[in-house]
Amino acid sequence: MHIAEGVLSAPVLGAGAATAAFGIWLGLRRLEESRLILAAVLAATFFLGSLVHVPLGPGSVHLLLGGLAGLFLGWAAFPVIFIGLLLQAVLFQFGGLLVLGVNTCIMAVPAVLLGLLLRPVLNRGGRMALAAGFAAGTGAVLGMALLAAWALALTDQGFLAAARLIVVANLPVAAIEGIVTMFVVAFLRKTRPDLLTGSMGLERRGASC
Amino acid sequence: MPITEPSGEDSGLLSRMDVRAKLLATGVCMMAVSAIQGIGPAVAALGFALALPLAAGIRLKSVMLRLMPANFFFLFLGLVLGLTYPGERVANVLRLSLDGLEMALRIALKGNTMLLIFIALVCTTSVPALSQGLRALGVPRKLTMLLALTHRQIFLVTGEFQKLHRAALARCFSPRCSLHVYKTFALLFGQTLLRSLARAERIHGAMLLRGFTGRFHILVPSVPAWRGAAFAALLGALPLLICLYDRWPP
Amino acid sequence: MTPQPFLGLRKARVRYPGADGPVLDDLDFTLHSGERVGLVGPIGSGKTTLLLSLVGLVPLNQGELVFQERVVRAKTDVAALRRAVGFVFQDPDDQLFSPTVLEDVAFGLLNLGCSQAEALDKSLAMLEDMHLAHLAQRQPNTLSGGQKRLVSLATVLVMRPKTLLLDEPTNDLDDRSRELVMGILQQSGCALVVASHDQALLDDLTDRRFSLRDPLGGWGVLLS
C-alpha cells in the first residue's frame, strides 16, 4: 500500500519521516552487524511478497506480509520494511522519495506493534500460533489502511471520502493476508517449529564458529 | 513481475553525475515542487521535469510506463475528490466539485513532476552506487549496507520462488480464488523463506571462512571531488525559482 | 622428504539434529602438504559435510580436527586454519554477496587487515591474472554461471591459501569455463581437496582419491 508522491501535505510528510527515522534507528540498534546478511536475506524474502500476486475476485492483489515480518523480526522489521519500500521506489517507481517516511510508518508501525503483541501467543505454538498468524496478517493490513487514511485526512478534510474508500477496499485484502499468514505459520510449525518458539537469530551476539 | 534493473549505465548526461550531487539535487527539486500551490507554476515545473529523463537518456515509452501505476491512483483520487469534495458544484448531472477537481489536478501535476525527477536522477543510479552515495551523505553504515546486501539477495530469492512456482504450475496449479490457492501460495512462500534461511547460513559460513569477524570492512571507493556540484545547484535552482514565484509572485 | 600431515580428521563423527544416523562415522582423513585429493562418493555420503567439518563450519560430535599436527580447539586455532585453507562453495551465489565483484574479491583481504589501497591493488591484480578485470564493477547477479564460478574462485585465491577445498567446482559449467577452472587450479600450486562427480576432472587434477561410503554401509576407505 503506497501513497503516491505529491498527495500529502508538508507537515504530514515531515512527521512521517521523523517517526520512520526513529523507528529505523531503534530497529538498527537491535540488529547485530554480524547477522546483517541474515537480515538482508529476510528483507529480500519479504520484498518478494510484494511481487507475488494472489487472485482476488476478478483481479489480483500483491501480498504485503507486514504481519509476518513483524512477528518474526520485531523492531528489525522497521529498517527491513524501509529498505523494501526504498527498493520498490527505485526499481518499480511505487511510492516515492518524499513520501517514503510516511509509507514506511504506514507499513511498519502496525507490523512491529502487532509483532510485539502477538509474538508471545505465537511462542505457545499449537492452534494459538495459527490464530496469532491470522491476527497479525489481518491486523497489519487493517492498521496500514487506517494509517494511510489518517495521513490523508490530516492533509485535507476533503480527503475523508477517499480515505474511507481506502479502508473499505482493503477489507478483503486483510482477510487474504490473514489466511496466507496463517498458512505460512502452519507450514513453519510443521517444518521448523524452532522458528516459532525461538527467534530468527538477528540479535545473536558475535559470530558463530 | 520482472525486475528491471536500473543499470546506471545509460549513456545520458545525468547518469554520469556524482551520486551525492544527484541525491541532493533530487531532494531540493522535490521539496520545491511539493511546496508549489498554483496550477500554472505546477505546469511549468512539469515541463522542466519532462526534460530530465530525456537528458538522462531514458526512452519516452519507458518513462510513460513507469508513470502508469501512480497515475491510476491519481485518476482514482480525481474521481473521488470530484464527487465528494465539499464546496461549489458544477451544474451538471454528476455535480462535480470544482475545488475537488482542481485539487486532484494539482496533485497529479505535482506527483508526476516529482516522479519524473526521481526517475531521472535516482533511478539512473545502480543500487550499489546509490548505497555508497547515501553513505557518503551520512546515512548510517548499517542501513546502507543492508540496502546493498538486500538488493543482491532479491535476485536469488525471486529466482528460488520462481522455480517453486513454475514447478507448481507444471502440476496444473491454476491461481483461482480459493482456499487451496491461498494455501499453495503460503506454502511456496514458506518454502522460499526456509531456503532463504538456509542460504543465509551458507553465506554466513562462507564469510566466516574468509575471515569475517562480525564487522564489515568494505572497500570504500576513492571519493572524487564534487564534480557536478555546480550542475546539481543549477538543476535545483529552476524548481526553486518556480516555487518562489508561486509563493511570492512579483 | 616425506610430506607432513597438514589437515585432517581423527575418528570424526557428525550427526545432524533430527537425522536418522550420522553422516560421518569414525572417519579418518588426512591431507598432506601439497597433496591433491579427490573426494568421491554417492550423493548423501557426506562429501560436503567432510569439507565443511575440515574448516570447522560443521562441528564434530566426536573426534578431532587436526591442523598442522595440532588439535584445533581454541578460536585462534580456527582462525589460523581458515587463513591457510580456502573454501569454494558449491553454489557461487552463496559466496558472492557483495554489491560488486571487486568489493567481493576485496572482502577477505580487508578482513585479514589489509589497508584499503593494498586490498584494492591485490584484488585488481587477481582479477587481471584471471582475465576477469572487465568484470570488476559488475554486479554478481548480472554474471553468467561460469563467470560467477571464476569470480568465486578469485575471492578465495586472492587470500593466497595454502590449501583449497572445492565442492563440485565444475557443476553446471560449460566446457570452456570448465577448462578455465581446471587451468587455474593447476596453476594455483595449492594443495587440493576436490569433491566431485567429474571423473575426468579428478583424473587430471588429483593424485589420489578418498571415497566415502554409501550412506547404507561400508567405511570410508583409501583407494590408492
Image (cartoon, helix red, strand yellow):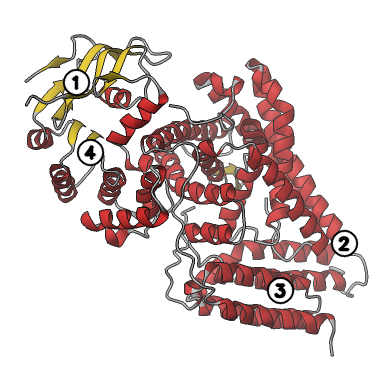
Image mark 2: chain: A
Residue B123 has which mark?
A: none
- How packed mark 1 is, by other alpha carbons closer than 10 Å (few <14, some 14-19, many 20 or more), is some
Q: CA distance from mark 2 to mark 1?
A: 78 Å
Q: Secondary structure at mark 2?
A: helix
Q: CA distance from mark 1 to mark 4?
A: 21 Å
The residue under label 4 is C169
Question: In this view of the protein, can residue A168 be seen by the observer?
Answer: no
Q: Nearer the viewer, mark 2 or mark 1?
A: 1
Relative to B131, residue B155 above or below: above
The residue under label 2 is A158
The answer to whether A127 appears left or right of C57 in the picture is right
C95 or B157: nearer the eye?
C95
Q: Residue furthest right?
A: B87
* Three-letter code, disc 2: Gly
Q: Nearer the viewer, mark 3 or mark 1?
A: 1
The residue under label 3 is B109
Image mark 3: chain: B
Image mark 1: chain: C
Numbered circles on residues, count: 4
Q: CA distance from mark 3 to mark 2?
A: 18 Å
The answer to whether C134 appears left or right of B235 in the picture is left
Q: How far from the left and from the top, in percent, is residue C50?
A: 27, 22
* Three-letter code, disc 1: Thr
Q: CA distance from mark 3 to mark 1?
A: 72 Å
B29 or C185: nearer the eye?
C185
| Same chain letter for marks 2 and 1 | no
The C terminus of chain B lies in which quarter of the figure? bottom right
